[in-house]
Image (tube, rainbow, N blue to C red):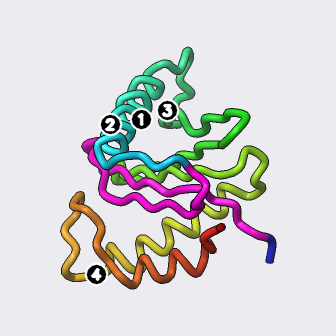
Amino acid sequence: MPSRVVFALIIVNRAGGLIYQRDFHTGLNKLSINDYLVLAGTFHGIHAITAKLTPEPIPGVPSTGIEVLESDQFRLQCFQTLTGTKFLLFTEPHQPNVDAITRKVYELYADYVMKNPFYQIDMPVKCEAFDRHLGSYIKPRQ
């Protein structure tokens, strides 16, 4: 199986609040929790604005907003669920199959967070099983 070069994962609830953040690469610059909160809220706002920027909407096809942001150093892939939860995956710029990785992360979230009877929707994710399975799927890089 090819190596998954994922730098970080951020999950943002439908109101723009940060509910999960995890780094997978020790070489990344560390951000404060306030920086992550600002990042989540800012991306949520940009996503909402870009969803309205579609010049000619196609009938029956919802406008999705920003899905990918690329730079020389990283790629930010956004996957939004039907409930409005956003999964932001930071990867290497040329990481293949980011959509498949994002779908698998969402599948793990659905299995271990949403099916947890103690989890409350839109609240911070504190689930050991999710952390463990996510960590084994996306191997942290040193």
Kind of residue at badge 4? Asn
Q: How many discs appear?
A: 4
Instruction: From the viewer's perspective, tell me whether residue 109 is left or right of residue 105.
Output: left
Q: Is residue 14 visible?
A: no
Residue 123 in which image quadrant: bottom left
Where does the image place residue 128, in percent across and percent down from the top left?
36, 82
Q: Is residue 86 visible?
A: yes
Question: Residue 38 shows which numbered tag?
Answer: 2
Kind of residue at badge 1? Phe
Q: Residue at x 49, y 65 (%)?
A: 106
Q: Start and end of the magenta stretch?
A: 3-28
Q: Are marks 2 and 3 in contact (CB under 8 Å)?
A: no
Residue nearest the observer in this picture, 73 or 50: 73
Q: Which residue is identified by label 4?
A: 116
Q: Earlier in the sequence, mark 2 or mark 3?
A: 2
Q: CA distance from mark 2 to mark 3?
A: 19 Å
Q: CA distance from mark 4 to mark 3?
A: 30 Å
Q: Residue at x 37, y 32 (%)?
A: 42
Residue 8 on the magenta segment: yes
Q: Are marks 2 and 4 in contact (CB under 8 Å)?
A: no
Mark 2 lies on a secondary structure that is: helix
Q: Residue at x 28, y 81 (%)?
A: 116
Question: Residue 65 shows which numbered tag?
Answer: 3
Residue 13 on the magenta segment: yes
Q: Which residue is identified by label 1?
A: 43
> Which marked residue is nearer to the observer: mark 2 or mark 3?
2
The quadrant of the rendering that contains the N terminus is bottom right
> Which marked residue is nearer to the observer: mark 2 or mark 4?
2
